Amino acid sequence: MSDPYQPGQPYQEPSQQQPQPGYSEQAYPQQAYPQQGYPAAQGQYPQGQYPQASYPAYPAYAPEPPGRTMGIVGFILAFVISPAGIVVSAMALSESKKAGVDNPLGKWGLWLSIIFTSIAVLYVVFMMLFVFGGLLTVFSTSSTFDSVGMSV
């Protein structure tokens, strides 16, 4: 038998008829082992009916309800930046409502954001009234204008 890898000769595929050198087909006889637990042919089971598995079934992964993460973020933003909490909580409630899921953290975040924002707005309004109102009273009660100038 000639070596197919000799230099100067083109590569030739060994034919399927010839066994590889060093291997004999009789040294390793092919044995057919029966396949246990598998059907011998397709179509053995009726449509839609398959045998029960021998291992225990695990519960399926339940995806997170939509809007839950944004509800948590909106709840946290209610205490930090309440106007942003209003926006994020409203978006979370909108997503949850589309999916038909209740979102209590989104509701709490929305209400707390509205309350904290209104308190902050009232605080700013009262501070402005206090500062400007105090300035007006100081100038109106302590000074008088006459024809010569201002006297205190």
Image (spheres, rainbow, N blue to C red):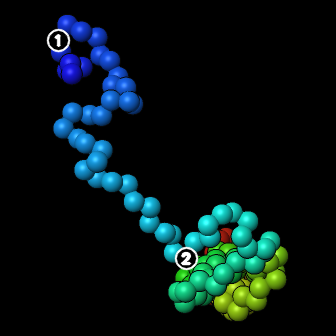
Q: Which residue is mark 2?
A: 37
What secondary structure is found at the residue carrying circle 2? Answer: loop
Q: Is residue 66 left or right of residue 22?
A: right
What secondary structure is found at the residue carrying circle 1? Answer: loop
Q: Is residue 13 left or right of residue 45?
A: left
* Residue at left offset 29%, top offset 16%: 11
* Residue at left offset 55%, top offset 76%: 37
- Residue 48 higher or lower than 118, as above or below: above
Q: 20 or 133: nearer the eye?
A: 20
- Residue 21 higher or lower than 105, as above or below: above
Q: CA distance from mark 2 to mark 1?
A: 52 Å
Q: How many numbered marks are there?
A: 2
Q: Contact, CB < 8 Å: mark 2 with mark 1?
A: no
Q: 26 or 36: nearer the eye?
A: 26
Q: Which residue is mark 1?
A: 7
Assign the N terminus to one quadrant of the image. Answer: top left
- Residue 150 higher or lower than 115, as above or below: above
Q: 63 or 19: nearer the eye?
A: 19
Tell me the amino acid under the disc marked 1.
Pro
Mark 2 or mark 1, which is nearer to you? Answer: 2
Q: 140 or 96: nearer the eye?
A: 96
Residue 152 seen in the current view: no
Residue 9 seen in the current view: yes
- Quadrant position of residue 8: top left
Residue 33: % across, % down: 44, 66
